[in-house]
Amino acid sequence: MIYLRLASVSEVNQSHSNAHWSKPRLQVELENEDPLSAKSLKISGWRVDEPMSRVLQRMLPSLSKLQSLQFWQAGLTDQTVISFMNTTSLCSNLSSVTLEGNFLPKQSYHLLLSEDSVLTHLSLRNNQMGDEGARLIGSALSTTRSANKNLRSLNLSFNSIGDAGAKYIAQGLRYNRALLFLSLSNNWIGDAGAADLATILRDFALTHEEVVERRKLQLERAQLSLQSSFVLDSDRSPSDQLPSVPSSSSLSSSKGKKKETNKKAEKPAATKENPKLNKKSSDVKVSQSKGSKPGGKEKQPPLQEVPEVKSSTSLIEQMEETINPLLDQSVQYKEGKLFLPGNTTLVSLNLAGNKITEKSLPLFLKLLQMQSEGGGGRGGGLLRLCLQRNSFPSDCKYYVKIKELIKLVDPLEKNNHEPTEEEGQKS
């Protein structure tokens, strides 16, 4: 039998004051006295073995109000993460997951931000994922064919991610238009990785493979649009539709009917004096109704054999849902290449505590200057950019200019430096 120890609020406060934060504990935040009203569940310093994992998997779906699930140094394995991922999909209100201090040999972290994941906040700090884990994370963020559409905040701090890993993350940001906050602080990212990240935040050139994929998507979209217009026409009332051209089968059927009517006209009319003729004609009618001659009810014209096509409304919704950044109408052709608008959805990028030098700062400065000038009329862009504790002096001229530009748009900076009434009157 497994006993789960619940830490009270007073114990939590005492643990922080006495530096006993590392003690194994399970903390539950309840909305009311009902145990099923749990809003937050945190397991810290407590190894979640197989038996406990099974208990949690059975318990979590019953917590309909659970919003946050946190594991800190819980000794999770790849298999338990996969199992929890299947379970959390049953938690209707779960939006935030924290998985920190849990090294997974097979780097299964990316499963938490799959295309169908409903999580909006994900923290994966201090998991030693390295460049391989970053590669899987980047692919989960987006590819030319799929993208995560719900995640808003992603924390990848303290994960030994280098330039190669930063390039994978940048690749994932090319077509992701949902993520707002990204932290890559305290990693091993240098100038090459910083340049890759700065490049995708402004207009970037498409590779040959991306150009080919763009043409495929355009063709698919044109076919879907044609199918949608066909369904729209079929949805109209018969009076609004244009007369259709008869097919060869319908023409042969009509000829057959004309011949039958001519034969019937040649036959003498049935009378009381000739009852055999009545019987014979009735037999003919029955045989015709049971048969499968052309023009019968069983055989429909070709245009009527498309009932499986979706309705016009569902097709239009499908077209709207499948909009891909590769199909952006703002694409530009210059210098022999196609340039796609950069990612202007990301508003916060934390690169503090890395190995960036003064060499890559002009790229970020130019990006911010373009944003301040209007960004080509598209709007959006970075509101926060953290670059402190890198390999350049704090009085570097580029860094000083970057801070000045960020100060103008960063909401936190504005709130911290609001002028007083006297300062406002003097200005």
Image (cartoon, helix red, strand yellow):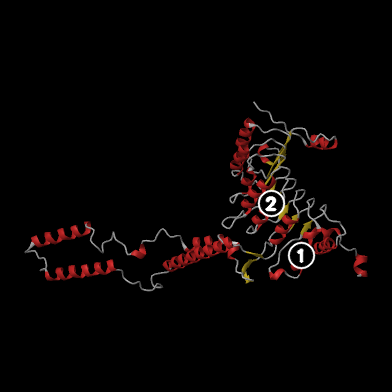
Residue 239, percent across and down?
39, 73
Residue 279, quarter of picture: bottom left
Residue occupying image coordinates x 74% and y 64%: 367
Identify residue for label 1: 368
| Left or right of residue 194: residue 178 | left
**Label 2 CA crowd tier, 10 Å (few <14, some 14–19, many 20+):** many
Q: Quadrant of the N terminus?
A: top right
Instruction: Specify the amino acid type for callout 2.
Output: Ala
* Residue 308: mark: none
Residue occupying image coordinates x 24% and y 58%: 292
Residue 41, percent across and down?
70, 39
Say if 71 sits above or below 203 in the image. Answer: above
Q: Tell which of 153 and 370 is nearer to you.
A: 370
Instruction: Tell me the distance, in whole angstroms, between the alpha carbons under discs 1 and 2.
Output: 24 Å
| Left or right of residue 215: residue 389 | right
Residue 164, percent across and down?
69, 51
Q: Secondary structure at mark 2?
A: helix
Identify residue for label 2: 164
Question: Given contact means CB atoms under 8 Å apart, are the residues at marks 1 and 2 in contact?
Answer: no
| Left or right of residue 287: residue 163 | right
Q: Secondary structure at mark 1?
A: helix
Q: How many marks?
A: 2
Say if 346 sits above or below 374 in the image. Answer: above
Q: Residue furthest left?
A: 273
**Label 1 CA crowd tier, 10 Å (few <14, some 14–19, many 20+):** many
Q: Quadrant of the C terminus?
A: bottom right
Residue 404, quarter of picture: bottom right
In primary-sequence order, the first of circles 1 and 2 is: 2
